[in-house]
Amino acid sequence: MTEPEEIRAGRAAATEAPPVFRLDGVTKRFGGVVAVEDVAFDLRPGEVHALVGENGAGKSTLMKIVDGLYGPDEGMLEVGGEAASFSSPRDAEASGIAMIPQELDLFPELTVAENLFVGRKRPRTGWGGLDWETMRGEARKRLDELGVGLDATSAVKRLSAAEQQIVAIARALVGEARAVIMDEPTSSLTERETRQLFGIIQDLTAEGVGVVYISHRLEEIFEISDRITVLRDGHHIKTAPASELDAEELVRLMVGRPLHELFTRSQSSPGETVLEVRGLTREGEFEDVDFALRSGEILGLAGLVGAGRTELAQSIFGIRHPDSGEIFVDGKEARIHAPQTAMERGIFYVPEERRSQGLILPFSIKNNITLSILDRISRLGFVSRSERGIADRFMRELSIRGAEVSAPVNRLSGGNQQKVVVAKSLAREPNVLLLDEPTRGVDVGAKSEIYRLMDDLAKEGKAILLISSELEEVLSMADRVLVMREGRISGEFSRGDATQENVMTAATGTAGREVSEDE
Amino acid sequence: MSEARARVAGTESGARFRRYLGRPETPALAFLVLLVVAFSVLSDKFLSVPNLESILTSVAVLGVIALAVNQVVLCGEIDISTGSMLGLCAVAGGAAAQSTGGFLLPLVAAVAVGALCGAINGTLVTLGRIPSIIVTLGMLYALRGVILLVTGGAWITGVPNESRVLGMGSLFGLSAPVIVLFGLFVVMEVVGRHSTWGRNVYAVGGNRRAARLAGLPTNRVRFFAFVLVGVFVGIASMIYMGRAGSVQTNTGTGLELQVVAAVVIGGTSISGGRGSSLAALTGAILIGVILNGLVLVGVPGIWQQAVLGALILLAVTTDVVRRRLVGDGV
Amino acid sequence: MSSAVEVMRRLRFSRELVLLGVLIALVIVMSLLSPLFFTLGNLLNTSRYFVEVGLMALGMTLIIITGGIDLSVGSNLALVSVAVGFTFAAGLPLPVAILFGLMVGMAAGFFNSIFITFLELHPLVVTLGTFALFQGLAYGLTGARAVSDFPDWFAYFGQAYLLGAVPGQLIIFLVAVVVVWLILSRTSFGRYVYAIGNNEEAARFSGVPIRRVKVAIYTGTGLLVAIASVIYTSRVYTARGDVGLGLELDVISAVVLGGASIYGGSGTIGGTVLGIVIIAILRNGLLLAGVPSTWQLFILGVLLLVAVFLNEFFRKGEE
């Protein structure tokens, strides 16, 4: 394992060369809203430049300008020292800029080899047909360069998320990219796969390719990046070498409040066991899971992405069906085949993906909140007028800001949208709340409001299962911590005993990596 | 890293076998073989060369159109106007044959009319941004009206023999329709594997957004697929006219359903991005075999429509069931 | 922020106003084409054949809002007509035959819903298959035969007048419109329909009983088709296996003309009713002017294309 220090030192030499691309004084507006204003950003060859900021800070707008999806209203873009103006991602690609979005934009039915060549000039044989042999060979060469052995002839749909990401990077390389923009690249990767990705990033930068790394994961950012740029509300706040910043200051720049003030937790007094799970198994996802959840407690469920936590929670909620095992609610066995059954037993799940799973974006805030309780507030099927009052109450209690209750929910910011999803679950008055990454992609201000809400709910006697990949969050909020690794429970710690080390050890099965900043 | 490579080496040969099993046209081909065996057992007239050739000839019109509609479906669209299109192209070709005779002029007339209809479909779908199901549903009826307008209700008869070559001719013992069918099949296979447009069709149908971002001309790709349908319908209409010797105002009615059935039964996915020309051909032959087999076994013709409907349902059901069993991400 | 909401509301009003304007213009044009058009008797008679399409369009509205489609409604109509007529001819008392027909219609809709919900197949391809299957069954079971010797009272459904001059079916239709409108706009079921059409996955995570809703809308449409079929059979006083051809075009056109997005998520009963009325007036006016039915289909086909195009055009304006 290479130390972050060494990487950074090695790449410091690359600071002399002219930038791969440079943005200066860039402003972009959508309708009346300013997305970015007077922002400067540059990427040097061979560097990893992290771009951080809350949701809505303007990171993706800025990169979409570089990628040719938008044109700036003001300001300029320079590539390799020359002014550039793109009208499509194709233009950007021709100038050596490649973007790898979170959704990857690959073609699942086509082979790995073909994916590398879609939209590009393909090699042809003598008689004019496509030269598949050469394309496969080229694909294998690129994959070897990345140090990965993948079957170039297999369909992309058969690959894992990490393998698909590597294909996306290979595709960028075939296009002779000099700059690769990665948007939340590790959100679906396991720890091992993240290591692999970092290795690839190091190889890329050694070749002089610049990497823009957009992420919310501060630990990764400090490990991999040379410079960090912070955006806030569309403005450029600061750009500095990573060695000159630390996590606390970074958060302060992003939001204006220091890190430690966001985490609170009252003393908990857990009561009866409200949810118990025994021997729950679902092939390929999780195996032989046992745990108990008591009223008034927050049970943290830590682990790496892919450990099976979401699958477990969704099985308790009835979205998936376990192959074997039992679930007990308030001591009585529950056969949960559908979300409705789980809801009737007092369980509610707040999903990971807010926009695609949690909300109906064109619906009003009110209709989103009451969607889960329509059956309860309807008489003979007709929706009661009390609906409006219920929605108003939740708007107040959860401090949902940004639009009126009858406005479409897609007007709200990420944090407020998340609160609407939580409101929907609370409207059902569940006894057990399964929260899956409740603060992901949420600005730091709304995060603390959600933490306070969780604290209040626990004090009221609700039982909360908190699934989170952010270690600090779990350690601060949970009364007990369960750790899952590759589908099994690998550790259990009480609040007093849980530390970063022992949780990471249980999550990875090996000694955790050193944490360089605060301790 | 080396473990990953070792894993790859061991499974490449196993993977290739599994890949052939997983190909979209495999179930249909297997079913076809099964049916051929079953029918030859049930009726000794089935497996004779004249009967087999007659089956292939009778599905030639269907098969030629299916090869083109296959491309439209692969793009993620659909075309249910082909029945009326066939009627209109046959009228155009027939009129040319009646007035000037010859072989080339009627064919050119039919293909030109077909291409025009296809272009209208394509324009409405791409520039008009109207879903193809609606466009082609509307065109299905609109074109039927145009046929009435142009013919005034009268049939076209007395087509000279020289214009009926595509339907009546033969070469080396094989009938012209069969030659045209297999010829176009080979062309489409080559186009599908070796032409930029052919590969782009798979990309556009597989992930339209990514295709657009990769710079593919998604509108042009789809437009061309609709025009191709028009061209192939034009050719097929000359096969039809050749065999029938006349054109009625209701020529082609109901054909569009058989075409979609052929494409879907053969294994091309209705959601796009997955399938092949072999799937379309197999599907067309399968329909021909089934309908022919039913006649030989004694089932009256009025049941054909019901059988067709049941087949479509059966085909898409087995596809879904198979993909769930194989774990193909359904 | 609130001014944007106002603009949006105005745009939405304008679509329905445009439809109303088209309706009025159409009435004027048709009156000019034929002096017989603008008589109370004719207008009320027009309502006869839009009731059949209208009933089916009510069900189709909900289906299209959920992002689905049903191409088999015309064939279902034929199947129910045959079920009623031929069981009656075989000796079953007519009221029982009618009941049987209603059940057949519902069963057909239910059949569709099984493939769509449990097998999760695309409604387009399923209803394409059942379009052929139902029509094939209707025709195959009956051949070219027809049943016409119904008792006199049977004509009541399709040909009676209530309150002097109002056709009987109109009352049935108005009741159906009110019922379906109430369901769609005021009940939790209606909310579920919109939720599924906008984001089915989020609806699932919110506990919406998706399967139950889908089964209900396809089966319910089957019932509406069956009622329409009984009225139709009574009106033409004959049960045959080869009827209902092309009806799905009218039905889908009405819904789309009324403003529903073919992609799902939006649509109203009011819009659909306006769409139905426009199509009915178009058909009636053309008939009176002596335009043959193939031409009518041609015009309808063009109308459908124009309607969808305008829909999406307006929708882009709203975004």
Image (tube, coloured by chain):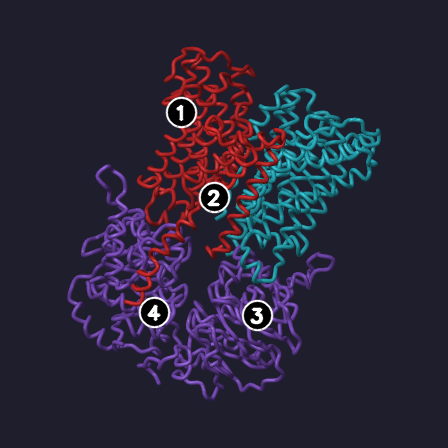
Q: In the rendering, what colour is chain C? A: cyan
> Mark 4 belongs to which amino acid?
Thr
Tags 4 and 1 both on a single chain:
no
Mark linked to residue B174? 1
Q: Give the Cα separation between the discs numbered 3 and 1.
A: 61 Å
> Mark 2 belongs to which amino acid?
Ala
In the rendered image, which quarter is residue A368 located in? bottom right
User: Residue under circle 2?
Assistant: B30
Q: Give the Cα separation between the discs numbered 2 and 4.
A: 44 Å
The chain containing the residue under callout 1 comes to: B
Name the spot of residue A491 as percent of width and height, x first: 46, 82
In the rendered image, which quarter is residue B145 located in? top right
Tags 3 and 4 both on a single chain:
yes
Q: Is residue C167 visible?
A: yes
Label 4 sits on a secondary structure element that is helix
The answer to whether the residues at label 3 and label 1 have Cβ atoms under 8 Å apart is: no
What chain is the purple one?
A: A
Label 1 sits on a secondary structure element that is strand
User: Residue under circle 4?
Assistant: A194
In the rendered image, which quarter is residue A297 located in? bottom right
Q: In the rendering, what colour is chain B? A: red
Tags 3 and 1 both on a single chain:
no
> Mark 3 belongs to which amino acid?
Ser
Tell me the quadrant of the picture where the N terminus of chain A can be found.
bottom left
Q: Is residue A438 visible?
A: no
The answer to whether the residues at label 3 and label 4 have Cβ atoms under 8 Å apart is: no
The chain containing the residue under callout 3 comes to: A
Dot 4 crowding, Cα within 10 Å, few <14, some 14–19, many 20+: some
Viewer-nearest residue: A349 or C174 = A349
Mark linked to residue A324? 3
Label 3 sits on a secondary structure element that is strand
